[in-house]
């Protein structure tokens, strides 16, 4: 394989890895009706009490704000990396720097998601925890643009 394809493949690989987080992050950042509908569906599915709903909403607001901040940074580095990959003379060091920045941000996002789930777990009954766990396990990740473009 020729060396000039390495940055392109690296870029596509990275973009594929952030596809799932990108879809979730965009919905959280946009805060649109679909996020509200998903929240309502979750409340009904878990049969949350009024007190649980209030606690959940408070935690969710902070979480979504923080995730929105992360996604703003990811978008910045992602755009910079894509532009560098498709530049006339791509700079592998610049591509690597953007990739590394995105990886650090994703790692922080994953930690935030785990922290959020652990906090939510404490609010739920055993039955509700099981229902949430099953819902999360069954959830299919959203496909990335690269998956849709390449039929994966």
Image (cartoon, rainbow, N blue to C red):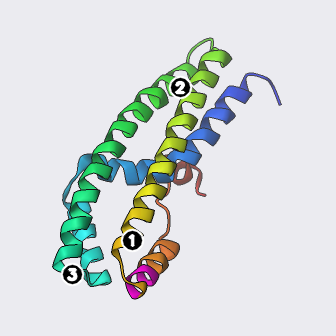
Whether pointer 2 and pointer 3 mark residues with C-beta atoms closer than 8 Å, the reply is no
In the rendered image, which residue does mark 3 sit on?
49
Specify the farthest residue to the front: 122
> In the picture provided, is 44 more to the left or to the right than 150?
left
Q: Which mark, by number, is residue 81?
A: 2
Which residues make up the magenta segment?
A: 127-131
Query: Within 10 Å of the Cα at label 3, are there few (<14), some (14-19), or many (20+) other Cα atoms?
Result: few
Q: Position of residue 57 (x, y in %)?
A: 22, 62
Is residue 5 or residue 44 the one in the foreground? 44
Mark 2 to mark 1: distance in Å?
Answer: 39 Å
Residue 150 appears in view: yes
Dividing the picture into quadrants, the one containing residue 88 is: top right
> In the picture provided, is 56 more to the left or to the right than 9?
left
| Magenta run includes residue 98 | no
Magenta-drawn stretch, dominant element (helix, strand or loop): helix
Residue 144 appears in view: no
> Which residue lies at the image location 39% right of the left edge and 38% below the top edge?
70
Relative vertical location of residue 36 with respect to residue 1 in this rendering, above or below: below
């Amino acid at each position: 394989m020729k060396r000039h394809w390495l940055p392109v493949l690296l870029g596509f690989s990275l973009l594929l890895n952030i596809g799932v987080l990108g879809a979730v992050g965009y919905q959280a950042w946009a805060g649109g009706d679909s996020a509200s509908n998903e929240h309502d569906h979750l409340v009904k599915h878990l049969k949350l009490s009024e007190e649980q709903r209030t606690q959940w909403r408070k935690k969710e607001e902070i979480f979504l704000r923080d995730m929105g901040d992360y996604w703003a940074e990811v978008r910045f580095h992602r755009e910079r990396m894509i532009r560098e990959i498709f530049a006339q003379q791509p700079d592998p060091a610049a591509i690597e720097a953007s990739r590394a920045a995105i990886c650090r941000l994703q790692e922080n996002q994953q930690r935030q998601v785990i922290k959020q789930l652990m906090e939510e777990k404490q609010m739920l009954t055993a039955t509700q925890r099981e229902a949430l766990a099953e819902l999360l396990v069954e959830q299919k990740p959203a496909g990335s643009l690269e998956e849709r473009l390449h039929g994966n």
